[in-house]
Image: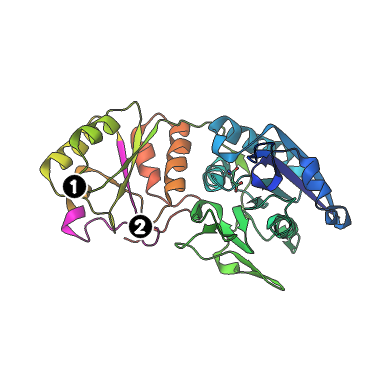
Amino acid sequence: MKNLFIIYTGGTIGMVQDETGTFVPFDFDLIKANLPDLSRLDYKITVHSFDPIIDSSNMNPDIWLQMAELIQTNYALYDGFVILHGSDTMAFTASILSFLLEGLQKPVILSGSQLPIGEIRTDARENMMTALEIASAKHNGMSIIQEVCILFDNKLFRGNRAFKYNSAKFEAFRSPNYPVLVEAGIHLKYNLESLLNNSDKDLVLHNRIDNRVGVLKLFPGIRPETIKAILNADVRSIVMETFGSGNTTTDQWFLDLLKQAIDGGKNIVNISQCKVGSVELGRYETSQGLKAIGVLNGYDMTFEAAVTKLMYLQGETDDQAKVAFWIEKDIRGELTVND
Ligand code: ASP
């Protein structure tokens, strides 16, 4: 019998409507009551509920660290882990866990739903059952999935490659820069060549996060004062969301501001506002200058992966140069280097 560990953090999956009609989180009993099939499964399931149960918009680094520690503490006892979580910030949690839990040999699958489990047309049952099935799947005694993933609407995504793109459809997530890992139809179709293989590794928990990260999203007409305020904030690194394949204005005042910040010890990481494709520094004249002043290449990282990877790397070291070095490297399958 497979042994699975469910971590319940909250989210729509277990919500009920209060007297005003607003969705509020409810305890795991609601999920159990609406999922009689749980007891028919051939798994031994242990549930850990966070207290309080939250809407994932209230997620924070303390809870991330608690989750990572919980998985490490229970790692040897279970075949797989399923985290029930609101979809709003699920991609951030999946991304940071992928960095905090190095060398995972067992699945950590986040899932939730767009409609509460008590609603007739809910997507919660399918999502949860499929997540449990994939979390228990083994081949030759090893877990098939050895990484942090998101299961939503019959698709399993690499956690640090996915983002919530739709708040209305059951198909809430996409990962356009990386193939879907499993498609659940009549059969579960594993995309074996796209999976991480950590068979030769041991789990290492990293338990520090430094959230001194800022975000600079560019738009034509952005004022120098706005940019200065972000660059001068008390942060060690800034994720800069640029146009197309990593382009920005070539105005000298703009490049001078970035250069000043970099020379002053800040890391600036270039990712694109486009959801598909990668930053290619130097492809256009409008990104050539960035490379010259030391802007770092975020390649095809999602926003969620870039922000949480910086938090993780900064937690690991006070050395800005080391953060700068590792942000451009693929460490958990989160980016594809294209140069
Ligand atoms: N607001 C909810 C949450 O993220 C949405 C969801 O669960 O899908 O907790």
Q: Could you say where residue 147 lies in the image, as x and y percent from the top left? A: 60, 53
Answer with left or right where residue 297 lies relative to residue 96. Answer: left
Q: Could you say where residue 204 lies in the image, as x and y percent from the top left? A: 60, 40
Q: Which residue lies furthest to the bottom in this view?
A: 186
Q: What element carries label 2?
A: loop
User: Can residue 309 be seen by looking at this rendering?
Assistant: yes
Q: Which of 254 and 81 is in front in this view?
A: 254
263 shown above or below 42? above
- Neighbor class of circle 2 (other Cα within 10 Å; few <14, some 14-19, many 20+) is some
Q: Read off the residue under disc 1.
A: 292
Q: Could you say where residue 210 lies in the image, as x and y percent from the top left? A: 46, 30
Q: Which residue is rendered at x = 58% and y = 64% of the image?
A: 181
Mark before the other along the chain sequence, 1 or 2: 2
Q: Read off the residue under disc 2.
A: 274
The quarter of the picture showing ligand 1: top right
308 shown above or below 280? above
> Looking at the figure, which quarter contains the N terminus?
bottom right
Q: Could you say where residue 22 lies in the image, as x and y percent from the top left? A: 63, 40
The image quadrant of residue 76 is: top right
Separation of disc 1 and disc 2 at Cα?
23 Å
